[in-house]
Image (tube, rainbow, N blue to C red):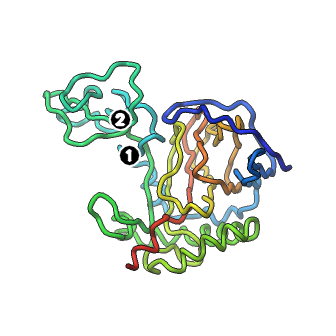
Amino acid sequence: MEGYLSKKDDILLSQFLECKNIINEDCDVYDKATGDLVFIFRKDIIPKELYNIDEKLVKHSRGLTPDRGNAAGKVTASGLLKGKENWKAKPLYPCDKDGNPLPPDHKKHTTFFKYEDGRISKRMRSNSVASHSVGGFTKNAGLPCRLTHWTKKNLSAYHSIFPLTSFISDKYFEYVPDKWLNQNEKYNSSPEEFMIPNSNFSTLTINMDFRTATHKDKGDHKGGLTCFTIKEVGEWSGGELCFPEYDVGLNIREGDLLLFNPHEVHCNNPLKGEGRMSFVMYLRDKMNQCSE
């Protein structure tokens, strides 16, 4: 199936939205006005054995991080507390830099917060969610280009994902060779030690039961596409990946593949149950600058 959809540009970021129009079949969608590709969706094309990854990766995907910005939604007291329930001084509520509570209708996706002991956090945080990057990373927060800390400490587990990333990269080339070649030029000019071998990616983000709010991905190669699939490690329903500006969602299950423009607004429908592990494969945009 091929479709050309009109885009509405009034979608705000950091909002939890739900799309009712769900696609369950192979589909290519383009923007009606520009003709630009929004996504390519293919059902049941990835062999099941490629999902036999090291259990350490599954465990890592369950860890929490407070640094996912818009994707984690508007900051709430419960979102700040998640994973910190046993802290001696727990986060109480989001506040400004002076400790004043934010109003209930605030729109912020990162804030300071007040601890139970009265202290104010030194850093702004997002809601805590289960989402981590694996593989290569560009300069940020004063750190150099590098393999992520977890990756360096767990190389064997990291290597177990390579058959899946290689297969998906080949499918990417098969379906959208012009985008793949554009991306591959930057891939080949980036330091080999930070690249996922035999692929077109530098980085893999793994999420567990993460219902994202409306957001656009940052740091992805602007001339390429992001590749996405699911590993089922429990029983769940919902969680469809949605493109709310086009009012459409995709029911992605294990074996399915999505290639999409990560700079379009996307989010997830509500998720019921547990065990939805997602893999987001991409090339960081400034990886080639790590050679300079």
Q: Amino acid at mark 1?
A: Leu
**Residue 190: x, y in percent?**
47, 77
Rendered residue at 48%/53% (across/down): 218
Q: Residues within 10 Å of mark 2 (few under 14, many from 20)?
A: some
Q: Name the residue located 73 percent from the left edge and 66 percent from the top edge.
A: 176
**Image check: 95 left or right of 60?**
left
For badge 2, the amino acid type reads Lys
Task: Please determine whether, in this image, residue 83 is positioned above or below residue 262.
Answer: above
Element at label 2 = loop
Nearest to the observer: residue 8 or residue 122:
8
Task: Write the residue at 59% across / 78% down.
Answer: 198
Proximity of marks 2 and 1: CB atoms separated by less than 8 Å: yes
Q: Is residue 290 left or right of residue 277?
A: left
Image coordinates for residue 152, horizontal then vertical, percent = 36, 70
Mark 2 or mark 1: which comes first in sequence?
Answer: 1
Which disc, if any, is residue 82?
2
Front residue of 17/84: it is 17
Residue located beneath label 1 in the image? 64
Q: Quadrant of residue 110?
A: top left
- Determine whether 151 is above or below 16 in the image: below
* SS under mark 1: loop
Q: Quadrant of the C terminus?
A: bottom left
